[in-house]
Image (cartoon, rainbow, N blue to C red):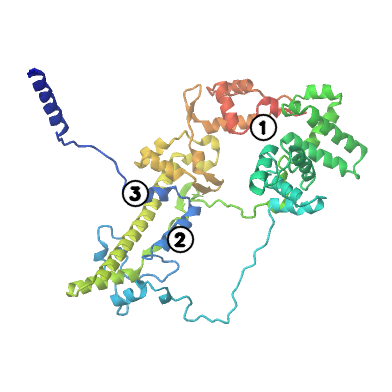
């Protein structure tokens, strides 16, 4: 009979008991968690919406919430106004004046019936003999449809070639370029239409499509686009003089043989290689500059007629030196809670106080009404808070940049960041960012984007803080007034700014120049 040592087993049992005690041990702890309420989330979303889109958001809320009404369209509610917007009062306590003896069963019969036939599809005064008024809409072809119409000008063999040509046209982008390679077009034709073709056949049809109007369409890059347009000018240039034709041929030679030198503006090298005079080179370059780098824009029908207008969120007036700030009236919609829904709640509460019994269907209907009224109150409160937050933020910006708004001189703009306005208003930086984003203010100097008033600080040689906007303005003026035959380099611009007292590095000048969409000195050079 074998004997096993007892001590190791005892130690194992003790460790298991300690482990089990640890696993089953419970503890209490306190943690600070920040969680936004649905009302706060709704407010944050409304703050981000510009005035131009606020009407759409309100219309959306009016559609999904029947308890919310627009006072501009409906009759004004005659009950006490404080009953509609009182924050500390539950919807059950709202007791507006009742109109004609409205009964709760009427609501159930009218709104809770699931039978679609119970809904009225026409008004009581509808006349079936009336003609439906239709607003005519101008029919307009798209750019690709315009190209497809020109396929009839080609002498295509059969439907197979037409399908290949249609695939090529469909692959042309919105700028008028064919940036897809032929192999991809061949694969699309094979998989989608079971049409087999070769790369040579695609190129042959592409050359025919490149003859379509507008000139340059179907080009695979800018160089080919410019070449097509110049060749088209020569082919259709019976009315051109001999000098004009010579100028176009010289421009075509530049694009075909010296495109790299042309893009880098190496004019001395071009003049030497072409053996042309400075005047001839300048005329040829002027001919190239007349060409359209985006052929699709040459199609008149492709112009978007739905022009987007900027609607200012704020209006700032200068009244003899006193700045008057106001919100755009579109930011203050006249919303109210539906009197019909409030009457329903009053009627149900009166029935409950009178000891009347309510069935399950009535309770569900009342719960639905209560939720809609609560949602309407939250939305109205969010709109009011949006107005107040936007006004306070813009007022702080106006006071901070008062000297600029009085003079309109961008050099008067003070360095200002989001934190500066957040400290003044007591709001969070993220809230200020939401208010500023995509918002505009109408001033006597034009409609300005709010983000234009924010900039970092830059120190002068005297230790004074100036806005980077001021430096950019001076930089833009220096480049605008420079000699285009000898444009100022970044090093020279840095020296001029430093002479004016601005402590700035060359790389900073280059960064500001790029932000102003100004090319380097070599690309600004002109003959």
- For marks 3 and 2, give the CA distance: 20 Å
Q: Is residue 5 left or right of residue 135?
A: left
- For marks 1 and 3, give the CA distance: 48 Å
Question: Which residue is label 3 attached to?
Answer: 40
Image coordinates for residue 311, horizontal then vertical, percent: 53, 52
Question: Which residue is label 1 attached to?
Answer: 480
Kindly tell me whether residue 173 is visible in this rendering.
no
Identify the secondary structure beneath mark 3. Answer: helix
- Which residue appears at 83% of the width and 50% of the height? 155
Whether label 3 touches label 2, CB < 8 Å = no
- Residue at the far front in the pictured view: 1
- For marks 2 and 1, give the CA distance: 48 Å
Q: Considering depth in this image, is 322 or 408 the residue closer to the camera?
A: 408
Whether label 1 touches label 3, CB < 8 Å = no
Classify the position of the N terminus by image quarter: top left
Image coordinates for residue 185, horizontal then vertical, percent: 68, 41
Q: Nearer the viewer, mark 2 or mark 1?
A: 2
Kindly tell me whether residue 207 is visible in this rendering.
yes
Bin the neighbour count of mark 2 within 10 Å (Cα to Cα): few under 14, some 14-19, many 20 and up. few
Question: Which residue is label 2 attached to?
Answer: 59
Q: Is residue 492 left or right of residue 29?
A: right
Bin the neighbour count of mark 1 within 10 Å (Cα to Cα): few under 14, some 14-19, many 20 and up. few
């Amino acid at each position: 009979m074998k004997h096993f040592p007892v001590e190791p087993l005892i130690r194992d049992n003790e460790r298991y008991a300690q482990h089990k005690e640890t696993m089953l041990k419970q503890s209490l702890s306190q943690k600070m968690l920040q969680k936004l309420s649905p009302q706060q989330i709704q407010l944050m979303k409304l703050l981000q919406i510009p005035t131009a889109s606020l009407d759409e958001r309100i219309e959306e809320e009016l559609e999904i919430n029947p308890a919310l009404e627009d006072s501009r369209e409906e009759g004004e509610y005659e009950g006490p106004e404080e009953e509609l917007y009182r924050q500390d009062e539950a919807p059950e306590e709202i007791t507006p004046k009742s109109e004609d003896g409205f009964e709760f069963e009427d609501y159930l019969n009218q709104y809770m019936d699931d039978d679609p036939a119970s809904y009225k599809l026409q008004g009581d005064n509808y006349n079936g003999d009336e003609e439906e008024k239709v607003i005519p809409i101008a029919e307009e072809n798209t750019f690709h449809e315009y190209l497809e119409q020109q396929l009839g000008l080609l002498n295509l063999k059969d439907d197979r070639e037409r399908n290949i040509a249609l695939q090529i046209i469909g692959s042309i982008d919105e700028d008028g370029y064919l940036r897809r390679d032929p192999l991809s077009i061949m694969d699309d034709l094979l998989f989608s239409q079971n049409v087999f073709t070769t790369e040579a056949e695609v190129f042959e049809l592409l050359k025919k499509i490149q003859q379509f109007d507008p000139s340059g369409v179907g080009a695979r890059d800018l160089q080919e686009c410019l070449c097509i347009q110049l060749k088209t000018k020569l082919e259709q240039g019976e009315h051109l003089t001999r000098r004009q034709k010579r100028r176009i041929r010289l421009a075509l030679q530049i694009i075909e043989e010296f495109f790299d030198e042309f893009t880098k503006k190496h004019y001395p090298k071009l003049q030497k290689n072409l053996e042309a005079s400075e005047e001839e080179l300048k005329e040829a370059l002027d001919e190239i500059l007349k060409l359209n780098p985006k052929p699709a824009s040459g199609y008149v029908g492709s112009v978007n007629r739905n022009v987007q207008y900027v609607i200012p969120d704020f209006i700032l007036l200068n009244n003899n030196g006193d700045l008057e700030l106001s919100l755009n009236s579109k930011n203050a919609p006249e919303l109210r809670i539906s009197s019909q829904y409030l009457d329903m709640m009053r009627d149900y509460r009166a029935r409950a106080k009178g000891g009347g019994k309510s069935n399950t269907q009535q309770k569900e209907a009342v719960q639905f009404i209560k939720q809609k009224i609560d949602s309407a109150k939250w939305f109205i409160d969010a709109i009011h808070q949006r107005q107040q937050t936007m006004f306070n933020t813009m007022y702080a910006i106006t006071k901070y940049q008062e000297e600029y708004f009085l003079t309109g001189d961008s050099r008067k703009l003070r360095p200002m960041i989001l934190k500066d306005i957040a400290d003044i208003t007591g709001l969070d930086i993220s809230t200020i960012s939401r208010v500023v984003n995509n918002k505009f203010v109408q001033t006597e100097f034009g409609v300005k984007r709010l983000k234009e008033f924010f900039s970092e600080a830059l120190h002068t040689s005297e230790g004074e803080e100036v806005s980077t906007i001021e430096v950019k303005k001076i930089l833009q003026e220096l480049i605008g007034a420079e000699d285009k035959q000898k444009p100022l380099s970044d090093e020279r611009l840095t020296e001029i700014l430093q002479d004016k007292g601005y402590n700035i590095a060359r790389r900073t000048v280059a960064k500001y120049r790029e932000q102003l969409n100004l090319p380097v000195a070599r690309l600004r050079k002109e003959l």
